[in-house]
Image (cartoon, grey):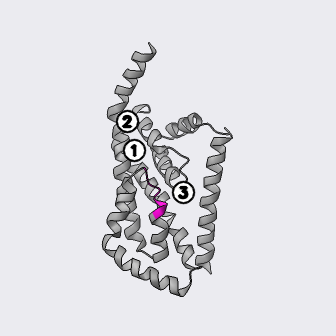
Amino acid sequence: MKKILLTGVIITSLFIMTIVLYYSMEASIMSLDEVIEIIKGMGYAGAFLSGFLATSTLFLSVFPSYIIIPLLVGVASLNPLLVGILAGLGAGLGQYLHYYVGVGGRYVLSEKRKESLAKWRLKLEKYGLWLIILFALTPLTPDDLIWIPLGLIGYPKVKALLAAITGKIILNLFYAYAGYFGWPVIEDLLNSILI
């Protein structure tokens, strides 16, 4: 009963967070510029929060960490290595919450369906780690497509979390170093156009 309650709380929280972030941006309660300024002011904690917010919403990403992470390095002049690692940790943890949506789904499945999912677990034991890292590395796919099934089949939690963090750190290091090396080029280009 405690597991069902915990899963329900996590799923409800994720949906509420998704809806609040989406509608606060849509209703201009908080503009993207204001969010960026708040996160820049938070420094390295902002990098962690940016990664977490970018991945913790369900199916709909309303927080553009791919913009904010390079800005933290290029404009706020933070260390790109630390920004990438902290944003990756936040993103990995945010994505990991979706695992529990799948765990909650196990409680509503029939025994026959659970048995068929057990076959998938054997297949994912072999390639699941690489699949999680691959999905975490790609910014274009909603990672929920893999996380919910991982929770449904009961894939090992620690293994899944470490794979997610690894992939998200690599992705966010790419964003951070793009801001580090690319920001001066972008800034020069904007200055030449505007002047």
Query: Which mark, by number, is residue 83?
Result: 1
N-terminal-most mark, 1 or 2: 1
Residue nearest the observer in this picture, 116 or 53: 116
Name the image quarter holding the C terminus: top left
Q: Secondary structure under badge 1?
A: helix
Identify the image quadrant of residue 180: top left
Q: Circle 3 — which element?
A: loop
Q: Is residue 3 magenta?
A: no
| Horizontal arrangement in the rendering, residue 143 relative to residue 167 (left or right) | right
Residue type for callout 2: Gly
How far across and down, in percent of the image, does residue 7 sit?
59, 71
Q: Amino acid at mark 1?
A: Val
Identify residue type, mark 3.
Answer: Phe
The residue wearing badge 3 is 59
Q: Residue at x 45, y 16 (%)?
A: 194
Query: Contact, CB < 8 Å: mark 1 with mark 2?
Result: yes
Q: Residues within 10 Å of mark 2 (few under 14, many from 20)?
A: many
* First along the sequence among labels 1 and 3: 3
- Vertical placement of 42 versus 8: above or below? above
The residue at the point 47 percent across, 40 percent down is 68
The magenta span reads 140-145
Residue 179, numbered circle:
2
Ranked by sequence position, the earlier of labels 2 and 3 is: 3
Side of 118 where 37 appears, left or right: right
Q: Residues within 10 Å of mark 3 (few under 14, many from 20)?
A: some
Q: Is residue 192 above or below residue 16?
A: above
Query: Which residue corresponds to the image point at 44% horizontal and 35% vertical from the top-left?
Result: 71
Q: Nearer the viewer, residue 154 or 90?
A: 154
Residue 74, percent from left and from top: 40, 32
